[in-house]
Amino acid sequence: MHMADALLSPAVGATFWAASGGAIIYASKKVRLEIDEKKIPLMGVLGAFIFAAQMINFTIPGTGSSGHLGGGMILAILLGPYAAFLTIASVLIIQALFFADGGLMALGCNIFNMGVFPCFVAYPLIYKNIVRDNPTAGKITVASVTSSVLALQMGAFSVVLQTLLSGRSELPLTSFVLAMQPIHLAIGVVEGFITAGIVNFVRQMRPEILEGAAKSRPLSGLPIRNILASLAILALLTGGILSWFASSFPDGLEWSIEKVYGKAELPESVHSLGRILGGFQEKSAFLPGYDFKEPSSPEDAIPETYKPEPWPAVSAGTSVSGVVGAALTAGLALLIGFALKKKK
Amino acid sequence: MASFDSAYFDIKYLDTLSYKDTAIHRLDPRVKLLTTGIFILTVVSFSKYELTGLVPLLIFPVILVSRAGLPVGLLLKKIVAVSPFAVMVGAFNPLFDQQVIAHLGGVPISGGWISFASILIRFMLTVSAALILIATTSFPGICLALERLKVPRALIVQLYFLYYFIFVLMDEALRMVRARNMRAFDGRGTGLRVYVHLLGALFLRAVDRAERVHQAMFSRAFNGHFYAARRSGITCQDGIFFLAWAAFFVLCRWYNISEIIGQAALRVMHMI
């Protein structure tokens, strides 16, 4: 569920860069204060562990497909939230660079979606509250599954919001949510059981690792309380919005089908967020001089309220030159590339 | 994600590429990082329906690839193989946005197809920029740049450690996967139970290794700081590289260069 550069607007990208950057600075300070030296290489090794683990597949029973570990929750459980957050951030940075998973602009979003939710929401609010001070295998399993599911649901919903706020995709909110949330519910359950399995395995073999991790992370101090409070509100909000969408399920489905056939009456509530936010700008930028009047049947089917956004800076007359120029420019770029290569 | 062997091979290969010695490789990591950042910002800042205006930006990856002597085939393969999320989401645009907004030679083109094409071009540009950055800068180089750009030390140290351990632990994981697969007939033993135990064992080995590494580093007076041999300041070449590209990106942002070239070409054709 890596958010991608291509779907992102600069405003959304920058906002989440700022949020994740702030979280990184905060977590770094905390880690420096509380960490014992042994944890530094452990963080590095666990990051690499997640990496290696993601490349080992297992067969999902009953289906032909295979899955792998995502890793956010297990790091939070084994390292504590701050060290885990930095580890997740570092894994995502390497994925963005070496695999181009997501991209550099979307890195802020990805760190937020896959780091903040498991470490600063699901772990302290769900996992810690279920397991408390006397962990048993059963409690760990229940806690891991619940918190993994919650973290992934919030992360997936966050991807949806980021995409819609950016306004690069036409996918309406309802359909997007309906596509993302159920898939990530399934992923979350599997992820939770794997996490529980590993944690229980480690607890059996080397209980001191878990005890060490549990001790060195007091969630005291004022700032984290504030953060948690606001994140709790966010979580409630997310839950509320989610249930609202769940109840409007048939609506959304009908709507998307109608829209595909081009004869939809758009209910106001399912306008994509980006469209609403962008609406004012688009309307003010709309040039009445555009010649859209060429009659063709699919155009007529679209209701009057569904005015198109203009294609900025391109009118019908000049678009041919635009395409010609683009082809020439691309050719030129490739030629330059070859020329420079030969010179070497 | 790709199969284990190929993913591992790709990391190692990109890492090897980054130790070449070309004019691009010799540039200061900070300069490359910032230029790539501005490039990506420029690409994503174009409006949703922009198509032709994005094309001139192709020159940036093309020149870097050819000057740095990077293998074009591998980069293209990686771009295609990379997570298809953006492409999948973008593919819905033609379905939901059927309003015709342009005509090309009499063929009506809907806004959805144009914005989908725009997403594909953005995808290519941003992904290639990130891959080129790592292939010309090396990971320690990027860490050095981040350190000088005042990124918190804890994260930098973590990145260094992660980078070094990836290679160690991947070998370990690779051996375990091979062992499992050789013992698995008809898919038996590749299920969740064995998987969890496999990861548990891998985890314990990793922890033991971390312990040994920590002791080794501690006895060699590791104080949380990494020292790099190649430490140079910003040179004149770095300055020119940065300013020239930044100027070019701004130019691309304000003027549709494709449009201008196209108009000129059409005018020439009319004259003939």
Image (cartoon, rainbow, N blue to C red):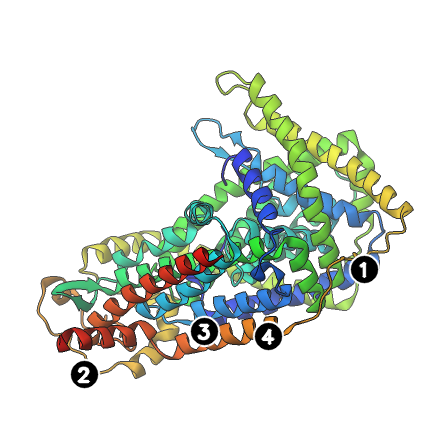
Q: Secondary structure at mark 3?
A: helix
Q: Secondary structure at mark 2?
A: loop
Q: Chain of mark 1?
A: A
Closer to the eye: label 2 or 4: 4
Q: Are marks 3 and 1 in contact (CB under 8 Å)?
A: no
* Cα gap from disc 1 to disc 4, whole angstroms: 35 Å
Closer to the eye: label 4 or 3: 4
* Cα gap from disc 2 to disc 4, whole angstroms: 45 Å
Q: Which mark is residue A32?
A: 1
Left or right of residue A65, residue A25 in this image: right
* Cα gap from disc 4 to disc 3, whole angstroms: 15 Å
* Cα gap from disc 3 to disc 2, whole angstroms: 30 Å
Closer to the eye: label 1 or 4: 4
Q: Position of residue B77 (x, y in %)?
A: 43, 45
Q: In the image, what residue occupies the spot 41% across and 47% down?
A: B80
Establish if A9 lies above or below A182: below
Q: Which residue is mark 3?
A: B249
**Label 2 crowd (10 A; few <14 / some 14-19 / many >=20):** few
Q: Earlier along the polypeptide chain: callout 2 or callout 1?
A: 1
Q: Which sits in the foreground, A199 or B242? A: B242
**One can see residue B262 in this view:** yes
Residue farthest to the front, as pictured: A343
Q: Which sits in the foreground, A337 or B243? A: A337
Tell me whether marks 3 and 1 sit on the same chain.
Answer: no
The three-letter code of the residue at mark 2 reads: Gly
Establish if A67 lies above or below B121: above
Q: Are marks 1 and 4 in contact (CB under 8 Å)?
A: no
The three-letter code of the residue at mark 4 reads: Gly
Q: Are marks 4 and 3 in contact (CB under 8 Å)?
A: no
Q: Position of residue A183 (x, y in %)?
A: 45, 44
Q: Which residue is mark 2?
A: A289
